[in-house]
Image (cartoon, helix red, strand yellow):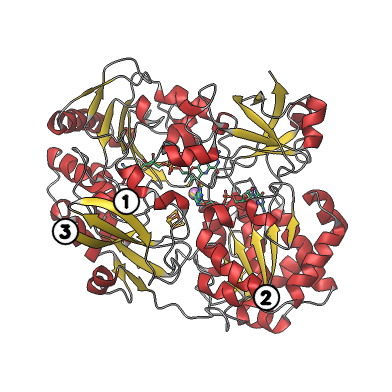
Amino acid sequence: MATRSVHAACPHDCPDTCAIRVTVEDGVAVRVQGDPDHPPTDGTLCTKVARYTERTYHPNRLLYPLRRVGAKGGGQFERITWDEALNDIAARLRCIAARDPTAIVPYSYSGTLGLIQGEAMAARFFNRLGAARLDRTICSSAGAAALNATYGSRVGMHVEHFAGSNLILIWGSNSIASNLHFWSVAQTAKRNGAKLICIDPRRTETADKCHEHIALLPGTDGALALGLMQQFIEQRLLDQDYIDCHTDGWPALREQAGQWTPERTASVCGITAQQVRDLARDYGTTRPAAIRLNYGMQRVRGGGSAVRLIAALPCLTGAWRHRAGGLLLSSSGWPQVQRAALERPDLLGGANPRTINMNTIGNDLLRETTPEFGPKIEALIVYNSNPVAVAPESPQVLRGFLREDLLTVVMEQFQTDTADYADYVLPATTQLEHFDVHTSYGHAYVLVNEPAITPLGEARPNSAVFRALAARMSFDDACFSQTDEQIGAQAFAGGVDFEQLRRDGWVRLPVPEAPFENGGFPTANGRAQFAPAGLGVAGFVAPYESRQSSPELAVRFPLAMISPPARHFLNSTFVNVASLRSIEGEPLLEVHPQDAAPRGLRDGEIVRTYNDRGEYRCKVKISDRARPGVVVALGIWWRKLGPAGTNANELTHQRLTDIGRAATFYDCLVEVAAL
Ligand SMILES: Nc1nc2c(c(=O)[nH]1)N[C@H]1C(S)=C(S)[C@@H](COP(=O)(O)OP(=O)(O)OC[C@H]3O[C@@H](n4cnc5c(=O)[nH]c(N)nc54)[C@H](O)[C@@H]3O)O[C@H]1N2
Ligand SMILES: Nc1nc2c(c(=O)[nH]1)N[C@H]1C(S)=C(S)[C@@H](COP(=O)(O)OP(=O)(O)OC[C@H]3O[C@@H](n4cnc5c(=O)[nH]c(N)nc54)[C@H](O)[C@@H]3O)O[C@H]1N2
Ligand code: SF4
Ligand SMILES: [Mo]
């Protein structure tokens, strides 16, 4: 028997980006394991990806190109050859492009975070075509814009150094579910005596294991940060020397913060004034103190301002002076990714096509041609994403996908909700079947993913599909004939040796141990910016929808709904893996007993959750994991597995964050009723 061990990387949208070893026996991948040598992975994978072979060899893998035969959205397809599929699609695209190439829209996000199966050959293809651009804002762009504004880039602490912290604020993060390897490090700190405080509207499994849990109302984190600043001033907890030497804008921010007394903060956040005072004292007096901020808290109208305010905290107390102090939201700014070489924006030839925000795809698919919008969307090419399930306000999204005159191509591994609405479904390879290189947004390493097995059926990597489409469109630039390995070799500058990467599976980036102990932020002047040009000082931005900010709406829809990820799914991925779905059970809505009683809800019955946008049915779970006034719909379920063929995005809306143009999934009022 021939046995091989292959270096791989977890492709999923998870800050841990694990290094994987795949064991291959006679051409079959039999096992995936965490790389014991890669420090953040430390030899373990989460339950989901430990089952990656189950997903790869799943009996429902899409293995052949398909063409729709029945009505749109009916899920009826016939098998065709790759040649037929590519010829048809190229002909349709050529015809649309002859009128206006910006009527063609790519739609992709985080099925894989690989640089090559993500936006390399795909971006080259769409740039050369002159297609519309996609603003990839469904997840993290508010927080990213906030970090860029404050620190100059998306940079922060090394995850490994949280082990040495004495206080860790786990803020807007259910780490056990969605940042497991950070949680292991936090456990080490806890064993060494560190205090862990969780700031989350939901009592998550992570909150259960922290020393304290502050269950604030969704979308009020900016107010809490301002309240902490007010207390730093009052309790004399500021590191004035760090502020003077390494920050700009404190006088203006100080004035703003001075108005946030503990009482005012407490009433906005739905917590007690004592909690604000105590948190400020703990954070301001413990050394080293670290914040693991995560993206859950920025999926609201004021998400960007909140991240700017929280990012100021470790500068005000000088927490950055220690390598185990500071903040980590994202580390994605550390690697020097050669985007221009990968994506070739020069192929646009000076054209400046319009941009479609992926969060408003529901509305945009329904828009007619206008001078402001540009042409009506005529073709949507979906890869690495499942928008029918994950995009906000599904009723609108569905109406768009049902358009008879829309050409929809879906490159997928499985027959997802989105694939059901396709005109052409093209079978895609999984991570075990293609080459890629990866950065991480939670640690400072880059990784390689070598193919472990040959593609199943007729599945093809995304890169191969765009290469083949480029050939049919007669795009003859040499970049369209590069192999995936050749593209990978161009991906990084600055301290990454490609041969070493392929030999070892991963390379640590040359990032200082305590990156901002002496300032040196990647801003223009090296100082953290609290009132950058064009933005000014951040303030509290209330949610679009909440009892305090929209009292009239709250009369009809008094409950705030959040819909964070379930532990055993990854967004809508893995929902179809039987062993993982059986752990999650079925779609549930958690409701606090105080909210359930007046509505006469009985545990386990199917309820109706609704607002003006739509209605979602699922079982109710009466539980004090939800705080009063807040209901929780863990996701992201496939619509077709919900009792009424819908999921929680039936209720979310398409409005955007204050900065970064991001989605506001957790800024959503609803009412719940028994059937
Ligand atoms: N198991 C698993 N892991 C995942 C994912 C998954 O689906 N499943 N998804 C991946 C992806 S794409 C991402 S972006 C990350 C997401 O992971 P995180 O960045 O951690 O974000 P969320 O899971 O959206 O939310 C984290 C926590 O924030 C809480 N929260 C909601 N609203 C607020 C608020 O207004 N303020 C505060 N303080 N907290 C709030 C939620 O209750 C939740 O417990 O995880 C990745 N990892
Ligand atoms: N209500 C609500 N909605 C949310 C969120 C929430 O918390 N609440 N979270 C939001 C967030 S943070 C995110 S990041 C988005 C995520 O939304 P998406 O980026 O759409 O992520 P997934 O749902 O995992 O879907 C990815 C799809 O890509 C496919 N795929 C994987 N690898 C490949 C490949 O190599 N090639 C091709 N062609 N396909 C591949 C998978 O099979 C899967 O169906 O959802 C957002 N939607
Ligand atoms: S999903 Fe996250 S924790 Fe799980 S294997 Fe991938 S990177 Fe690691
Ligand atoms: Mo995400």
Q: Is mark 1 within 8 Å of ligand 2?
A: no
Residue under pointer 1: 119
Residue 528: give x, y in percent of width and height. Answer: 59, 72
Q: Where in the figure is residue 331, as x and y percent of width and height? A: 48, 66
- On screen, residue 69 versus residue 647, left or right, reads left
Q: Amino acid at mark 2?
A: Asn
Q: Quadrant of the C terminus?
A: top right
As helix, strand or loop, the secondary structure at mark 1 comes to loop
Q: Which residue is mark 2?
A: 166
Could you tell whether 132 is left or right of 552 in the image? left
- Element at label 2: loop
- Identified at 69% across, 59% down, the residue is 198
Name which residue lies at 72% across and 23% down. Answer: 673
**Residue picked out by circle 3:** 2
Mark 1 or mark 3, earlier in chain: 3
| Closest to the observer, 349 or 294 | 294
Crowding at mark 3 (Cα within 10 Å: few <14, some 14-19, many 20+): few
Residue depicted at x 50% and y 35%: 637
Mark 1 belongs to which amino acid? Answer: Glu
In the displayed structure, 431 sits above or below 243; it is above
- Can you say whether 362 is above or below 573 in the image? above
Is 527 placed above or below 121 here? below
Question: Which of the marked residues, 3 or 2, is nearer the chain's N terminus?
Answer: 3
Q: Position of residue 202 (x, y in %)?
A: 69, 47
Is residue 444 visible from the viewing direction of this image? Answer: yes
Q: Nearer the viewer, residue 457 or 300?
A: 457
The residue under label 3 is which amino acid type? Ala
Q: Nearer the viewer, mark 1 or mark 2?
A: 2
